[in-house]
Image (cartoon, grey):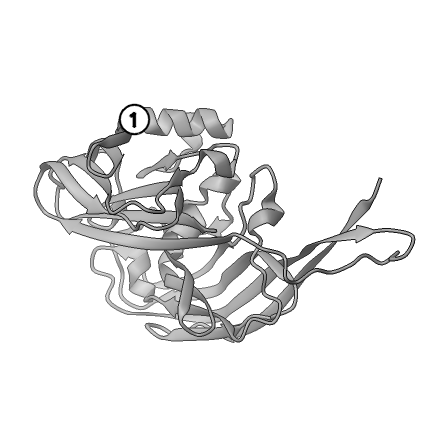
Amino acid sequence: MAKNIVDRLRRQIQSLPWNAGQPLQFDIPQVQDIELLKVSVAGTLTLTAAGTAVRAEAPAQLINNMVFAAGGTDALDSITGINSVFGNYKRKYSRFVTPPTGFAIGAYNVRARCIINVSNFGGIRPKDTAFGAYNTDLLQLTVNCGQVVDCFLGGATAGTFAGNVTVQASSYQENQKPVSAANPNGANDHNEARRVTKRSTLMLPYAAANSAQEIRLPVGNAIRLLKIHARDNLEPSDGLINSAIFQIGGTDVRVNLPYNEIREMNAADLGIPLSQIPTGYAVLDSSPEGKFSEYWIMRGETLGQLILNMNAPVTSGLIEVEVEEDIY
């Protein structure tokens, strides 16, 4: 029986200094297929005007958002730093983070590792959606930096950060290279058809209760999951959402569950305790095993809706919906 060769590479691509409020651009190698990208933020944060508390999701706020694009225009990922650090659902919410130990004027060592899952990690065959970077015209990751004071509540008004943003790509040479006597090193078929994973983030600021808030979803591909992140005064909250409905075409209801029940289902699907599900997160997962046959197929549809029953926030509410699609 023929065997397959899978060449796995792990390497650091580039390290750039963090720059408050500015974008950093990284050129990604266009050779091996990519499973994931890691963005590590580490250094010394110096607060020069004290706050009243450290934010629950600090220091992920040092990265506003990240955009992974091919060909200079096709955005395959557009996700927040917070979701990539604290909301890594597919990796059972594992996270590597060192927040500031205080909020007084002073210096604090901090670290956060952002993960961009480019492939269907945890699925039956992750290689099916590893991004085929071979001969891509242009492959770039743009990291938009936040502000030091975003990591604090209260009167923090100024601060500096001395450290580097490091991008590490974990790549798979996953082109189904069959081994045979005539071809002992394996063939490499770069023309093999692939699915591509795409993520986008929808933002909904709100101030008042709404029993049927509609969020329009993209159509035309297959939706793998909808990750909901609820925040009040930019702090994660489990008290904003009562329930969620996902429906297709205005009448085809696929999910209709209370918020707490969704979180309990997430814990059961991932095999982790409910206490490990981060505050403010609930995920509508079409296929816990990553089977493409179980995805919500939106091709040919004209309407996809997420309808939320929401309570009034204490100050200002923000609902972030990360939509993960497969383009096939």
Q: Residue at x 29, y 60 (%)?
A: 150
In-front residue for pair 68/274: 68
Q: Is residue 9 left or right of residue 276?
A: right
Q: Residue furthest front?
A: 300
Where is residue 174 shown, x and y percent of the image? 68, 54
Displayed quadrant of residue 190: bottom right
Q: Amino acid at mark 1?
A: Asn
In-front residue for pair 62/51: 62
Q: Is residue 281 above or below residue 192?
A: above
Q: Is residue 204 above or below residue 21?
A: above
Q: Is residue 289 left or right of residue 19?
A: right
In-front residue for pair 49/33: 33
Q: Residue furthest right?
A: 181
Q: How many marks?
A: 1
Figure quadrant of the N terminus? top right
Name the residue tied to disc 1. Answer: 260
Q: Secondary structure beneath disc 1?
A: helix
Q: Is residue 70 visible?
A: yes
Q: Is residue 100 visible?
A: no
> Mark 1: few, some, or many residues within 10 Å (few <14, many ≥20)?
some
In-front residue for pair 278/68: 68
Where is residue 164 shown, x and y percent of the image? 51, 70
